[in-house]
Image (cartoon, grey):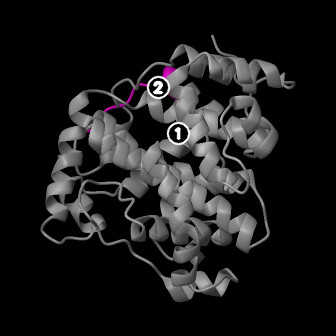
Amino acid sequence: MIPIKLFKSIENSTVYIVLFRIILKQEITMNSSTHDIRIDIQKLKKLPTLSYTAEKIINLTSKELTHLDELVNIIEKDPPIMSKVLGVANIVYLGLYKPITTVKDALLKIGFKTLKNIALSVSIFSLFKSSEEKEKSYMNLFKHSIATGTISQIISEKFLKEPSDENFTVGVLHDIGLFALHYSFYDQFKKIEETLLEKHSLKKAEEKILGTTHSEIGKWLAEMWGLPEIVCDVIFYHNDFPQKSVKYSKTVALVHLSNFIAHQLGYYPFEVEIECPFYKERVYKILNLPDVDELILELKEIIKEVDKL
């Protein structure tokens, strides 16, 4: 059994530790025909089990003291995970100097906390992979999530001058409801995609097929998992007015903006282009930032690296 320690903040990889706890233990299923889909979430079919690498990482990062060399060795022994980790690390690093080519190099240039969060993010999303039939749509979701998390971190560090590992984490997890749908309810996921071709908004398409939205599903799951309130708020409000989050409107505004920029740069969570809501005036009342068009120009070349993942 993996030792699990719960914390009130995102420190010590709480988000990931609790998430893996549920992936290991919780059984859930969903039936889109029901009027109250929350009842079905309680029966959700079993999510995937941990890979050896993911299990080792979660064991390691749940300890009070983590030896850096141990984390490096674990990542290096899993080439697919390592290649993804290095790819994301180079995007986060902004390519300011020479590219990151080794895990030890990543540790030196982006720091232990960021490397740990990237490794765990990649490990989590690798668990949701399934058949070849789903590979393309899975990669769309994966790249959209990484792009959103990376944009959140870059904006907070470079433009807001408020560096925070938290912003990468919440940005990456904002669409966790879509990952659950894609993995466990692929038929409904594809029906939503087909409905989007009829020029419905994502919210309307989801309500038509499911009677709810991926934001609500993600929030329900996050609450069951015991994730911090800030993560639940970002998941629930990332497509809505940021001010609806009483305590975390600034973080919600950041992820809302980052999600919109990811869409504008072509990183959609579906195989079809969708309209992404953007409440510009409300966001800019909270965040003191350059105009969104300027941000897109600044981020365009950096985020292109996501295509290499």
Residue 189 located left or right of residue 116: left
Q: Residue at x 20, y 55 (%)?
A: 193
- Residue tagged 2: 26
Q: Is residue 214 above or below residue 77?
A: below
Q: Which residues are magenta?
A: 22-30
| Amino acid tagged 2 | Gln
Answer left or right for 250 relative to 280.
right
Mark yes or no: residue 280 visible: yes
Q: Nearer the viewer, residue 20 or 32?
A: 20
Q: Is residue 138 above or below residue 266?
A: above
Please tell me which residue is depicted at 37% across the width and 71% down the height of the picture: 276
Q: Position of residue 56 (x, y in %)?
A: 65, 17
Using the numbered discs, state the Cα–Cα distance from disc 2 to disc 1 in whole angstroms: 9 Å
State which quadrant residue 245 falls in: bottom right
Of 144 and 110, nearer the camera is 110
Marks 2/1 in contact by CB < 8 Å: the verdict is yes
Q: Residues within 10 Å of mark 2 (few under 14, many from 20)?
A: some
Please determine whether, in this image, residue 289 is positioned above or below residue 276: below
> Where is residue 196 drawn, in percent x and y?
19, 63
Of 86 and 249, nearer the camera is 86
Q: Position of residue 180 (x, y in %)?
A: 38, 40
Lower sequence index among marks 2 and 1 = 2
Total numbered labels placed on residues in the image: 2
Secondary structure under tag 1 reads helix
Query: Residue 27 colored magenta?
Result: yes
Q: Is residue 94 left or right of residue 206?
A: right
Tag shown at residue 224: 1
